[in-house]
Image (cartoon, rainbow, N blue to C red):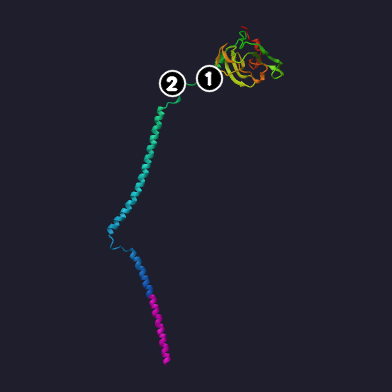
Amino acid sequence: MKKQKLSELAKKKGFFAILLSAVFVVVTVTLISLNLNSGEKKENLVDLDENPILTEENSENQVADSEQGTYAGDEGTSQQATEKQTQNETASNEHTEVSEETPDASQADAVAGVEPAVEEEASVPVMNATLESLSFSVEDGLQWPLRGNIILTYSDDHAIYHPTLMQFKTNPAILIQGTQGEEVVAAARGIITNIEENVQTGLTITMAIGNDYHLVYGQLTQTDWKVGDLIERGQVIGTLAKVTRYYTVEGEHLYFQVLEGEKTVNPMLLIKDE
């Protein structure tokens, strides 16, 4: 009987122990939760020792400083834009001053008293008009462009011997013997139509003398004449040069050719002794 009572008492003590443990756990969890909530509320509470007016002023000052920084940046950007615009205006003014002070080529020529250059296209009709005014008469003939012996005669219908080339071939001109540096004169009044450096005849000048006649002077030195120049009969057109390698055996001479259209003419038929 006593044992049964002791067993029931032990069971009751165990139950109370478990109950007390459960209560303790619940109380502990509740206290922890209250402490956590209390910490969060303290963070949101205003410090009573802090002056709320000073805090508000500090906040406003921070906002003002932020706005002032933005405005300062804007002012810096605006100032840079203003300086750039000023530089552009200065450069524009300097360019305008230089343009006003520097005359163009035509104005400079006018101030210096230099006549404006005539365009090449405009000179062609003038030369053509002068060519049309030229007139060559077979009766008047040609004068000797250079006094000397004929070392190679004209031949267009049969071949003659060329000593330097050591072969027989036709010769569309006459070779008048001379010395290097000797003057060559115009055989007739005419206009220079071509100046070229020919591998066989050296510096070669072609002149139109009218009525579709042309005179060709070869083996010359550098000349001061230019295409379009009018040369009078008997006027010096150049001097003899050292002969080209195609005529080394023949020696220094004037290569003189007469053309009527595209056909060669024997110069000796037109040269008049004077």
- Quick one: 69 or 16, which is closer to the camera? 69
* Outermost bottom residue: 1
Mark in front: 2 vs 1:
2
Q: Which residue is mark 1?
A: 123
* Outermost top residue: 274
Q: Is residue 108 magenta?
A: no
Q: What numbered label is drawn on residue 32?
A: none
Judge left or right: residue 33 versus residue 244.
Answer: left
> Residue 47, relative to residue 88: is it above or below?
below
* Residue 117 in picture, x, y percent from top left: 49, 21
- Quick one: 197 or 241, which is closer to the camera? 241
* Location of residue 239 by image quarter: top right
Quick check: can you spot residue 92? yes
Quick check: can you spot residue 258? no
* Residue 32 in picture, x, y percent from top left: 37, 71
Type of amino acid at the residue the image marks with label 2: Ala
Query: Of label 2 and label 1, which has the lower sequence position?
Result: 2
Residue occupying image coordinates x 53% and y 17%: 126
- Quick one: 211 or 22, which is closer to the camera? 22
Judge left or right: residue 159 versus residue 104.
Answer: right
* Residue 86 in picture, x, y percent from top left: 37, 37
- Quick one: 222 or 226, which is closer to the camera? 222
Q: Is residue 17 magenta?
A: yes
> Residue 160, relative to residue 69: is it above or below?
above
Q: Which residues are magenta?
A: 1-26
Quadrant of the drawing holding the N terminus: bottom left
Q: Which residue is mark 2?
A: 112
Residue occupying image coordinates x 41% and y 83%: 15
Residue occupying image coordinates x 39% and y 32%: 94
Type of amino acid at the residue the image marks with label 1: Ser
Dot 2, crowdedness within 10 Å: few (<14), some or many (≥20)? few
